[in-house]
Image (cartoon, coloured by chain):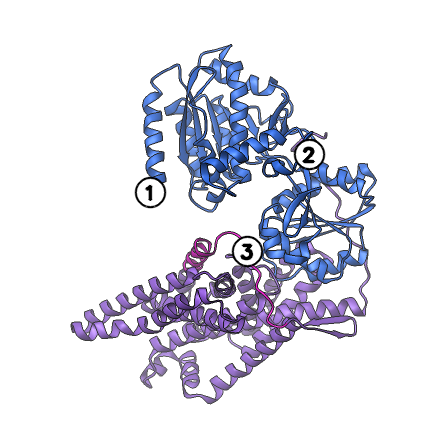
Amino acid sequence: MKLKKTLLALAITATASTAALADINIGVSLALTGPGSGLGIPMQKQLQLFPKTIGGEKVNLIILDDATDPGKGAANARRFVTEDKVDLIFGSCITAVAAAMTDVASEAGTVQVAGSPVGVPPGKDKWLFRLPQSNTVMGHAVVEHMKKQGVKTVGFLGYTDAYGQQWLDAVGPMLDKAGIKLVGTERFARADTSVTPQALKLTSANPDAILVVASGSGAAMPQLGLVDRGYKGKIYQTHAAATPDLPRVGGKAVEGTFVVSGPALLGDQLADNHPSKKMAMDFVQKFEAAHGANTRNQFAGHSYDFQVAMEKAIPLALKKAKPGTPQFRSALRDSLETMGRTVFAHGVMNWTADDHWGYTLETGVMTKVVDGKFKVE
Amino acid sequence: MPPRGMAVRIPYFPTRLSMDFSIASILLLDGMTNGAIYALLGLATVLVFTVTRVIFIPQGEFVAYGALTLAMLQSGKTPGTVWLLLILATMASLMECIERWRHHGNIPRALKSGLKPLLFPVAIALVSIWAAPQQFPLGVQALLSVAIVAAFGPLVYRVAYQSLEAATPLVLLIVSVGVHFAMTGLGLLFFGAEGFRNPTFWDERFALGPVTLSGQTVIIFAVSLALIVLLWLYFEKSLRGKALRATAVNRTGARLMGISTHTSGQLTFLMAALIGALSGLLIGPTTTVFYDSGFLIGLKGFVAAVIAGLSSYPGALVGALFVGIVEAFGAFWASAFKEVIVFTLILPILLVRSLRSGHSDEEH
């Protein structure tokens, strides 16, 4: 209830102030209810710490709930561009919702900064920038680590959905280039009652390492299946598994697993020369000061990075045009593309005209599960 | 770095491994273990369909509810299912009151009949709220979980199906779809999006040649077998079981003989929920159960029931073991197409069944 009231108040004050032409208006659409609310609510919490002015101009955030519904997300985006005439759209945190907003934003010539990995092909993403890491960037960290560990053969055990396929598409060529042989690809679904047949097939090929591609607590079951079949090699997990749910469900069986992760939540553990160390620590410290100890969350980290990007891009765009004009909107787009290497809590970003994913390859951090905690390797 | 978003197709690398006796026996055991669970759900589906003509799609939801209720009790929290149970019981009680009052116009009698659906669920709920923080041994918590979830059965029947008893199977099927969505959504609300894995009931391993038999597998087989025998005894020997069979054969005839279809329906759903909850406890230690895991498991039980023409218990048992074994071997040879293989099976089977039986069956 309180959240709704705050939102309403925010929306009203924001709409009322659109009249003031000089203000910068940012439309934010997040999943604050529905199945994606676990992602949207932490992002919204971080936005409470968003600065009131950037580059001397007042910034208004118009936050709307898209209820994890692509239709609602598209409607929110349409409202932003027609009624609120925003300078930029932030959201959504759910891929399907953000994808539904993309067409509206690009038609209106408004930048959309998505908090989810929207898979629009290059060329069609002229107005779309993404904050999360692509699987290619994370896959790079995995393959590099495998090379260092002397891994020669790898088995793949992944979800039968888009996440599994995207990872396979991403790491396949990299493994090839590194001279690591992919000896088996097996698939499973999150709700499967057993992975015994798949595990049996992979373990009999006996690869040096097995890459498990799954998310959250769903990542534990395949690994338990492998361990159950007596697999003694290295097991790698992806960044979607880098949550406390993996050791919670997996227990002893996931000890020693290598899990690739973004740096945002690992600030205190990173080496001093890691580029994101300062930002990651700053994010965690400010977020936990506002919302309590141990509340750090990777999705809130994306909101933090959004703020970092805005603080760099808005002053650049202000030099070229006045907020509220189409010129300012395209100036914002240009400055996001040309502002160059920017250090985020989630890694090092370098958006260019050809690359709207943008994270550099220094982004992925390899961790190892030790005593049920993720320790940076 | 390669350009993003460009789909790089990776050829499918089938792991080269020939089938030999040891692999076949491991797969067979895995398939039969899952098949035993599907058998229980298939039996429940057949049971519900024959007595009430409801194609009970939410059967699998009871599996997830059972496993997750135990997981909640394990962590010392009052399971969300308890609150849902109380809400459902209140709804059932109100419906009962209003219906009685409209029939007889007698308020005290209506209130008294409204008490009946409340008694057992409220008692269970109170016990659970008291027992949740006490960290009782696993066995006690398992019993409690089964009791909580089993209590859902009659309430679901009362609230969703009872007033539609005379409707066509198609209408009842549509209601089932609705109940399925409601139960999955409520599951997400009560248990959250993450999955849980329960502790094993028996941490023992036996080596049988190439196969290692875990204690949990033994329990799955033993419980499934015991339940099947109990069901058989119930329907063959007890009066109530015979009454259910009579309802299944001819509803009007059964009513003329003084068998209440309401009571039969509720009893059937109680048994279905009980079987579902037990299945949940059985698979809880072998896999991670999510709020929506039940649907696919239930659907495979349904395929088993369809193989049996939704009418024969031994047929459902054989069908379920068949589904489990096909699934295991399918996952071994082409894991990406496992579900496709299992669910495509239903097509030739339906074809054969319809060619053989023609259109003589009055119900389907």
Q: Which quadrant would residue B127 be assigned to in this image?
A: bottom left
Q: Amino acid at mark 2?
A: Ala
Instruction: Tell me the number on the disc at residue B195.
Output: 3
Please state the horizontal and vertical placement of residue B351, each as a whole percent of the image: 58, 66
Chain A image colour: blue
How packed is label 1: few (under 14 Cα within 10 Å), some, or many (20 or more)? Answer: few
Can residue A294 be seen here? The reply is yes
**Is residue A248 or residue A157 the one in the foreground?**
A248
The residue located at (71%, 37%) in the rendering is: A141
| Residue that numbered label 2 is attached to | A271
* Letter of the chain that mark 1 sits on in the rendering: A
Q: Amino acid at mark 3?
A: Gly
Tell me the CA gap for discs 3 and 1: 28 Å
The residue located at (45%, 39%) in the rendering is: A291
According to the colouring, which chain is purple?
B
Instruction: Tell me the number on the disc at residue A26.
Output: none
Tell me the CA gap for discs 1 and 2: 43 Å
**Is residue A124 or residue A262 the one in the foreground?**
A262
Q: Nearer the viewer, mark 3 or mark 2?
A: 2
Q: Is residue B226 left or right of residue B112?
A: right
Q: How many marks?
A: 3
Secondary structure of the residue carrying numbered label 3 = loop
